[in-house]
Image: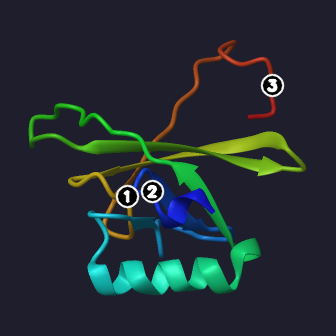
Amino acid sequence: MRWRDDGGWVLKPVLGRVGDLIGVEGATEEREWKTIRRGARWSPRHWVAQRRFAAVPLATPDGGVYPCLGVYTIDGRAAGAYGRAARRPRIDHLAQDVAVLIAQGETNDERI
């Protein structure tokens, strides 16, 4: 498992929601990070590892916010989208929900 020896990975629970139990070395409290790593070692099917990347905050009148854009899927097909924004790079339960708007004709899948 590459994530065990490389801080360039983010650990996420397979059925996670609103950023619960997202593990980011250096951005997750040490005690929680140890719990997340243990869970991923003991039950690897319940976790995914995502390559870490540097988020760039968006400028707002109230200061920078880190964006998060996600896609809901059903049987591997896009079924919807969601957006969140946070004051820190780790998007968790403290992040705010934001609207995701798609202009008509902007997608090949009109069911979104």
**How busy is the neighbourhood of tag 1: few (under 14 within 10 Å), some, or many (20 plus)?**
some
Determine the secondary structure under disc 2.
loop
Residue at point 51%, 67% (across, down): 4
Residue at point 79%, 25% (across, down): 110
Q: In this view, does 76 lie to the left or right of 73?
A: right
Quadrant of residue 49 in the image? bottom right
The three-letter amino acid code for the residue at tag 2 is Asp
Q: Do the residues labelled 2 and 3 touch (CB within 8 Å)?
A: no
First in sequence: mark 1 or mark 3?
1
Residue at point 39%, 78% (across, down): 33
Q: Cα distance, mark 1 to mark 3?
A: 27 Å
Determine the secondary structure under disc 1.
loop
**Residue 45: image x %, image y %?**
76, 73
Kindly give the residue lying farthest to the left in the view shown: 62
Task: Report the mark closest to the observer, 2 or 1.
Answer: 2
- Kindly identify which numbered label has been placed on residue 6: 2
**How busy is the neighbourhood of tag 2: few (under 14 within 10 Å), some, or many (20 plus)?**
few
- Kindly identify which numbered label has been placed on residue 55: none
First in sequence: mark 2 or mark 1?
2
- Kindly identify which numbered label has been placed on residue 109: 3
Determine the secondary structure under disc 3.
loop
Q: Is residue 8 left or right of residue 81?
A: left
The three-letter amino acid code for the residue at tag 3 is Asp
- Kindly identify which numbered label has been placed on residue 91: 1
Tell me the quadrant of the picture where the C terminus can be found. Answer: top right
